[in-house]
Image (cartoon, rainbow, N blue to C red):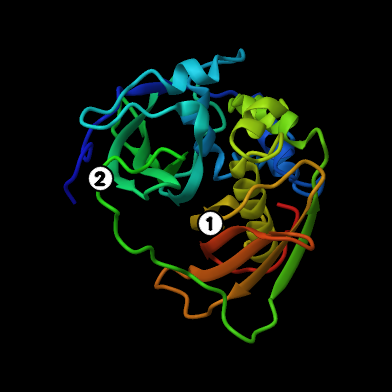
């Protein structure tokens, strides 16, 4: 697909992580004490939760907090208007898991390579920028994960760009009771813990940015809901085994506020592929309120609820 900005490659970003980063991430997305392989570094099958690399484009190699606005505004895209990165939220994310992630990057050189796939002018509501990010071992060329995501620049449309293709929707089956339902109670400290993974957007810590964007105050990271739902799907159907998750995606439909209870409904769709992975569709909503994750789809090797590895 061609269009303004399409194909632009961002500067390559070196990334790194320690076992401690994996432990923090697993804790922050709701992994439970019977999943010690995600929460205890001396477990014989200690492993990274598979979606962990989604945080690396925020974290880079840092172990200290960073200036979120300064970093996100550092690379303009040629041929596009200058967008305000203080008024951007996640639109949709899809991740493919190609190789098991090592539990530490120590002694190796990993990097994120990113490029623009599309830029879509949605008029008054804003602009969507779709990007691809791949995690690569720089020395071997091996690709570990591929993520396609979109950022929605609130109120920054009407610049004459293409409207973009019609979105593909993965709706839950009509009239079928979910195969599993999981609840997750958030608290006022939920986003304050999750941000320590490396996503230090002030929108998720202090009320002023959220008020300026029309959200009324602090909202929880969309990627917290995305990652915690990935955990629920893997725990319910994949035995909490990271090898049993092949793809995961969802669209960010509405904001979640600290203290909201999240309810995820999940449906097995049957017909596993030749490798035994089956489509699972899901919807996550705020209890008594709106859907916050729509278009939910995962490819899971279904073996039943989580078990001790």
Residue at 45% across / 23% down in the picture?
72
Q: In the picture shown, does residue 51 fall above or below 283? A: above
* Camera-side residue of 14 and 209: 209
Do labels 1 and 2 touch, CB within 8 Å? no
Residue at 75% across / 45% down in the picture?
30
Farthest residue, direction left: 2
Q: Earlier in the sequence, mark 1 or mark 2?
A: 2
Find residue 196 and report its image quarter.
top right
Q: Which mark is residue 161?
A: 2
Q: Secondary structure at mark 1?
A: strand
CA gap between label 1 and label 2 equals 36 Å
The crowd level at tag 2 (other Cα within 10 Å; few <14, some 14-19, many 20+) is: some
The crowd level at tag 1 (other Cα within 10 Å; few <14, some 14-19, many 20+) is: many
Q: Position of residue 77 (x, y in %)?
A: 27, 28
Q: Which mark is residue 245?
A: 1
**As drawn, is 28 to the left or to the right of 155?**
right
Find residue 109 and report its image quarter.
top left
Q: In the picture shown, does residue 66 fall above or below 25? A: above
């Amino acid at each position: 697909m061609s269009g303004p900005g399409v194909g632009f490659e961002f500067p390559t970003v070196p990334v790194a992580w320690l076992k401690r980063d994996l432990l923090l991430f697993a804790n922050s997305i709701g992994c439970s004490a019977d999943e010690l392989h995600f929460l205890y570094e001396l477990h014989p099958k200690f492993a990274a939760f598979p979606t962990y690399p989604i945080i690396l484009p925020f974290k880079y190699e840092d172990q200290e907090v960073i200036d979120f606005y300064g970093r996100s505004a550092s690379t303009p895209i040629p041929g596009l208007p200058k967008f305000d990165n203080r008024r951007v939220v996640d639109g949709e994310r899809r991740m493919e898991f190609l190789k098991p992630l090592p539990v530490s990057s120590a002694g190796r050189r990993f990097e994120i390579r990113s490029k623009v796939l599309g830029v879509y002018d949605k008029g008054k509501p804003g602009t969507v920028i779709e990007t691809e990010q791949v995690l690569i071992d720089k020395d071997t060329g091996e690709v570990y994960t591929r993520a396609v995501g979109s950022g929605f620049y609130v109120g920054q449309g009407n610049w004459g760009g293409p409207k973009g293709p019609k979105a593909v929707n993965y709706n839950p089956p009509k009239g079928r009771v979910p195969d599993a339902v999981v609840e997750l109670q958030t608290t006022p400290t939920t986003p304050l813990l999750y941000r320590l993974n490396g996503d230090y957007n002030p929108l998720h810590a202090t009320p002023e940015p959220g008020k300026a964007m029309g959200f009324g105050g602090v909202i929880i990271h969309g990627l917290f809901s995305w990652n915690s739902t990935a955990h629920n799907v893997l725990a319910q159907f994949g035995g909490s085994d990271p090898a049993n998750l092949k793809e995961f995606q969802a669209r960010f439909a509405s904001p979640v506020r600290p203290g909201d209870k999240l309810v995820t409904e999940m449906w097995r769709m049957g017909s596993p592929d030749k490798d035994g992975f089956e489509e699972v569709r899901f919807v996550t909503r705020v209890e008594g309120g709106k859907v916050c994750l729509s278009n939910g789809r995962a490819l899971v090797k279904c073996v039943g609820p989580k078990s001790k590895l």
